[in-house]
Amino acid sequence: MRKHVNIFVLFVALITCFSVVSCDDFLKTMPESSYSAAGSYQSQADFDYAIAGVYAAQQNLYQSNSCWFRLMISRSDDTRNGATYTYGVDQFSDSDNVENLTSGWQNLWTMINRCNLILDKIDAVDFKDNNRKSYVKGEAYALRAWAYYTLAWQFGGMPLIDHELTVAETKSVARASQDETFAFAEADFKNAIDLLPESWVGTDLGRVTKFAAAGGLARLYMFQSKFSAAKPY
């Protein structure tokens, strides 16, 4: 009987010891059933998914259930003044209570955040195709430039954030001027032009190209009436 008791005590002791030693490691294990930023951005495929996420946020601006694009058109004379679907945007009397403007703002900042994550992490990862690595970086620069340019012409100067920040750090970033925001977008467009291909083929058709980035830069210059700077692009 004593032998059985001793075996049981030894068994309990071993289990307890194992639990104490391994519990900390167990709690730190990356969940294998869900995606997280910490567990991603480790392979070429991860970055293909990540840049697709930036395009997805941009696409949200043009979905039928989001009137952001239509609201922007209503600033011009292409829509009838006083129409109910313009929420006062056509007469510049809108506010942050307009849900579709708020969702547009959120999607543009989602684009910037996702681009920052890509640009923060991509240089540390080996790609099977180094050209693809350059292209993804170029896309991130171009889409971040487009987002900042779009925010700047709508709302003026923005907080300029070019890397991943905590929430507390984000709140400490001061608002830049509109000219500074345009200059930030200008630098991003130029980086994109240097990295992007002239064209895409197959299932990649529709992705931003060197010429699309050049067109975005030209548009930015023209908005600022810098026509001589825009002309080469």
Image (spheres, helix red, strand yellow):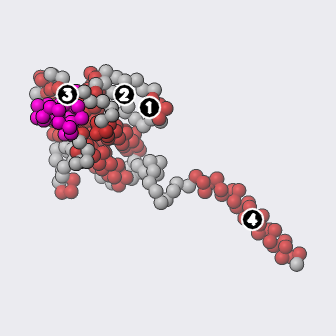
Question: Few, some or many C-alpha atoms within 10 Å of disc 3 (few <14, some 14-19, many ≥20)?
Answer: few
- Please report the residue visible at 33 percent of the width from the left and 27 percent of the height from the top: 158
Three-letter code, disc 2: Pro
Which residue lies most toward the bottom here? 1
Magenta segment, which residues?
Answer: 69-92
- Please report the residue visible at 18 percent of the width from the left and 57 percent of the height from the top: 202
Q: Which residue is mark 4?
A: 14
Can residue 173 be seen in the rendering of this structure? yes
Which image quadrant: the N terminus? bottom right
Q: Which residue is mark 1?
A: 170
Q: Name the front one of labels 3 and 2.
A: 3
Q: Which residue is mark 2?
A: 159
Percent coordinates x, y for residue 227 in the rendering: 12, 23
CB atoms of marks 4 and 3 within 8 Å: no
- 3D distance between C-alphas at marks 1 and 4: 48 Å
Mark 3 or mark 2: name the one nearer the start of the chain.
Answer: 3
Name the residue nearer the viewer: 122 or 96: 96
Three-letter code, disc 4: Leu
Three-letter code, disc 1: Thr
What SS does tag 3 mark?
Answer: helix
CB atoms of marks 1 and 4 within 8 Å: no
Q: Which residue is mark 3?
A: 91
